[in-house]
Amino acid sequence: MGELIYEGKAKQLYTTAEEGILRVAYKDDATALNGERREVFAGKGIRNNEITSLIFRYLAENGVKSHFVKQLSETEQLVREVEIIPLEVVVRNVLAGSLAKRLGRSEGEVIETPIVEFYYKDDALGDPFINDDHVLFLGAASAVEIETLKQEARKIGDVLTELFSKANITLVDFKLEFGRTKDGAILLSDEISPDTCRLWDKTTNEKLDKDVFRRNIGNLITVYDEVLTRLEEVTKHV
Ligand code: TMP
């Protein structure tokens, strides 16, 4: 079944018989506060795999390439092997979370031109917010790659904002990760799920994402299910 080569907070990565192709297995673990708080929610892995697979398929249909090859099972995908760029690329359409805190403003303010931010992926440092010059200094990405990451992030934001809007959901903000293929191309990687996005019901502003766990304000499985059902509904004729 392949060799386990990486285990993160929410996923495991295995080799496969095919060179350059890996198997991702989604776990039921939820973590917050940089891993300090951890809980297991039976069925979370299934939801995040289904949602991420649906979104990566939808993005491919809309011209966004990713590492996604195909969904293998309820909890597994096949993906292309990439070297992960150690940056979390966050796009913000509506003020919330750490940016609302940092700027001392209330959550919910619309950001007319989406803000793209970089965070340096380093658990020991708590994934600090960094700027383009820091990215260059750290050697995390080249100047050309920084521009590619920003362009791709904005494009993905446009496509996904429209998709979620059809599902009566506001895409408040989200986090992306990218990787390099052996030939140096940059591919969207990791996952896109309610673990990595803030999703608010358009009518009620109810939170439909991991904030229900982070802030202890609801049932994680119920809201992840709601997101999956709505996305399936709006993509079933695609
Ligand atoms: P933040 O407001 O806490 O900075 O989060 C911005 C977005 O990025 C939000 O949709 C949650 C997502 N995110 C992750 O997926 N992983 C992380 O480690 C962090 C800090 C945020």
Image (cartoon, rainbow, N blue to C red):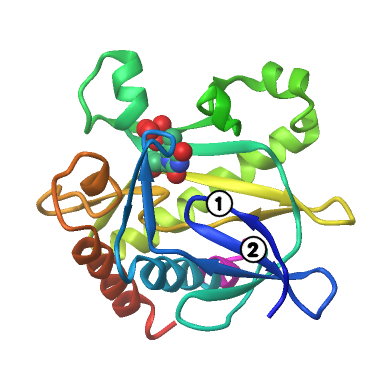
Q: Earlier in the sequence, mark 1 or mark 2?
A: 1
In the rendered structure, the answer to whether residue 59 lies left or right of residue 145 reads left
- Is residue 238 among the parts visible in the rendering? yes
Identify residue for label 1. 8
Quadrant placement of the C terminus: bottom left
Give the residue displayed 63% in from the left and 36% down from the top. 87
Magenta-colored span: 58-64
Q: Is disc 2 placed on a helix, strand or loop?
A: strand
Q: Which mark is residue 149?
A: none
Q: Is residue 32 above or below residue 222?
A: above
Residue 17 coordinates in the image, percent (x, y): 80, 80
Categorize mark 2 by other alpha carbons within 10 Å: few (<14), some (14-19), many (20+): many
Residue farthest to the right, as pictured: 183
Q: Nearer the viewer, residue 91 or 134?
A: 134
Identify residue for label 2. 13
Quadrant placement of the N terminus: bottom right
Q: Is residue 27 above or below residue 187?
A: below
Residue 64 coordinates in the image, percent (x, y): 62, 61
